[in-house]
């Protein structure tokens, strides 16, 4: 970042959220402020053989409120619908509309996860012709693939806004949202666009996703207490809870925002990325990518660890990964490890890969605007060796306007962003 050069200073001017704890920024923030989570017993699908009975689902979501016609639903999976809806909200929040800006100066950078195919989309073809010949292929809906391509959220967002500038999709698991943000910042800094729509979306509540992720993720079995099932950093955590959601942001050059006369949520001071390729057998080595990402973001911001007002953690209640993250944060913070407040918002809305990182960032930006840091739900006692100041019980007033939001995949892909509110 270049803090003294308005031509390369980038700010957030719009936020849109679709989450299990609220649709729209106001509803979403209200839940965070009141400590109201969205993890419940799975409602949409039922089955005793599923690896978990818990999920964080988005309820009362009507995609047609944010789409030009019902026709486009034919080529939109739920993941895409969530992302397009969040982007629509962010664009409205930023005071933009189609045709307001030169189309070539507006771009999109969006994160996406794995958009799974549904059995019913392919089952008839599979049953009819086991050798997958031309007859069987003709039983597959021609537009089937358009619902499953990870680049489609970015495509639909750009079509809706007539954004003809740089367009990119990031598929890097949990880090996708922050890396999409970093891409958007880079596009603006090098002068290729004045304004970018960035964000990410994902939905993991279908049985296909529950079963698939249940093979590689430890999922909480705390069916008797859904509200406290996802317990980041807690000594008694037994796994994560899957969910769905999306968040999107309008980012633009600060002089461009001033010329439009719009308010800014925060300035993006620094972004960073790293990878270590370890799942956690050696926690110190496994967290190296996250250490690099945070260090790079702080360096870009020109700040020291002690300058942070709060940290929005990746933690999702995973026994190994939460410990890796805690140790990495302690390495970066050093003697300040117990002095910088840390919150983990997946305790409210669960884990949904690319989309969760975006929703977490929205939580931090709104926390800065309202000068209040939500507590981590389900946190009772710290994991041995965790020396972090985990905000629990009650939220806290925020005085320091600087925040760090981080994400890390189970394979060590890591990303970090430092933001500062006005």
Image (cartoon, rainbow, N blue to C red):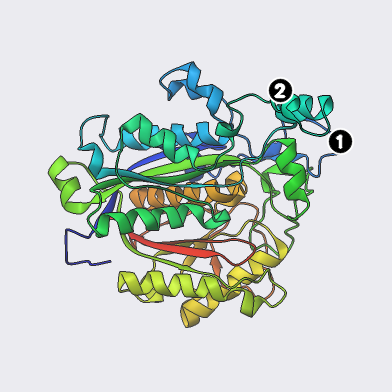
Q: Visible in this render: residue 89? A: no
Q: Which mark is residue 48?
A: 1
Q: Secondary structure at mark 1?
A: loop
Q: Quick one: 94 or 186, which is closer to the camera?
A: 186
- Residue 378 horizontal side relative to residue 125, left or right: left
Which residue is outermost to the top?
Answer: 70
Q: Is residue 281 above or below residue 261?
A: below
- Give whichever of discs 1 and 2 has the lower sequence position: 1
Q: Quick one: 49 or 140, which is closer to the camera?
A: 140
Which residue is outermost to the right?
Answer: 49
Badge 1 local density, few (<14 within 10 Å), some, or many (20+)?
A: few
Instruction: List x then y, in percent, for residue 258.
Output: 15, 47
Instruction: List x then y, in percent, for residue 63.
Output: 50, 24
Residue occupying the point 63% across, 42% down? 243
Q: Which mark is residue 139?
A: 2
- Residue 266 horizontal side relative to residue 396, left or right: left
């Amino acid at each position: 970042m270049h803090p003294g050069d308005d031509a390369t200073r980038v700010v957030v001017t719009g936020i849109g959220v679709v989450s299990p704890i609220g649709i729209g920024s106001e509803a979403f923030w209200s839940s965070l402020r009141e400590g109201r989570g969205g993890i419940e017993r799975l409602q949409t699908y039922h089955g005793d053989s599923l690896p978990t009975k818990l999920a964080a689902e988005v309820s009362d979501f009507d995609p047609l409120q944010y789409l030009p016609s019902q026709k486009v639903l034919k080529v939109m999976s739920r993941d895409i619908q969530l992302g397009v809806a969040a982007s629509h909200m962010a664009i409205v929040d930023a005071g933009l509309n189609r045709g307001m800006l030169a189309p070539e100066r507006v771009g999109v950078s969006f994160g996406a996860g794995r958009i799974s195919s549904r059995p019913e989309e392919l089952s008839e073809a599979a049953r009819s012709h086991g050798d997958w010949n031309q007859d069987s292929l003709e039983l597959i809906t021609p537009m089937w693939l358009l619902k499953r391509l990870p680049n489609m959220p970015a495509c639909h967002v750009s079509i809706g806004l007539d954004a003809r500038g740089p367009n990119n999709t990031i598929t890097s698991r949990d880090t996708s949202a922050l890396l999409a943000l970093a891409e958007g910042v880079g596009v603006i800094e090098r002068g290729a666009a004045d304004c970018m729509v960035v964000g990410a979306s994902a939905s993991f509540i279908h049985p296909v996703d529950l079963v698939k992720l249940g093979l590689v993720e430890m999922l909480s079995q705390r069916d008797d207490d859904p509200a406290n099932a996802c317990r980041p950093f807690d000594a008694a955590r037994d796994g994560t809870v899957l969910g769905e959601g999306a968040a999107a942001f309008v980012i633009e050059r600060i002089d461009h925002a001033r010329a439009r006369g719009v308010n800014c949520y925060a300035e993006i001071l620094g972004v960073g990325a790293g990878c270590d390729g370890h799942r956690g057998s050696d926690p110190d080595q496994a967290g190296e990518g996250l250490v690099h990402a945070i260090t790079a973001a702080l360096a870009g911001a020109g700040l020291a660890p002690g300058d942070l007002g709060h940290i929005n953690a990746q933690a999702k209640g995973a026994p190994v990964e939460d410990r890796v993250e805690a140790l990495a944060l302690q390495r970066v913070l050093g003697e300040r490890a117990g002095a910088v407040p840390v919150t983990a918002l997946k305790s409210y809305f669960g884990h949904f890969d690319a989309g969760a990182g975006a929703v977490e960032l929205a939580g931090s930006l709104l926390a800065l605007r309202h000068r209040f840091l939500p507590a981590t739900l389900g946190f009772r006692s710290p994991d041995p060796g965790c020396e972090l100041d985990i905000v629990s019980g009650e939220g806290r007033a925020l005085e320091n306007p600087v925040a760090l939001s981080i994400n890390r995949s189970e394979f060590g892909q890591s990303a970090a962003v430092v933001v500062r509110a006005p």
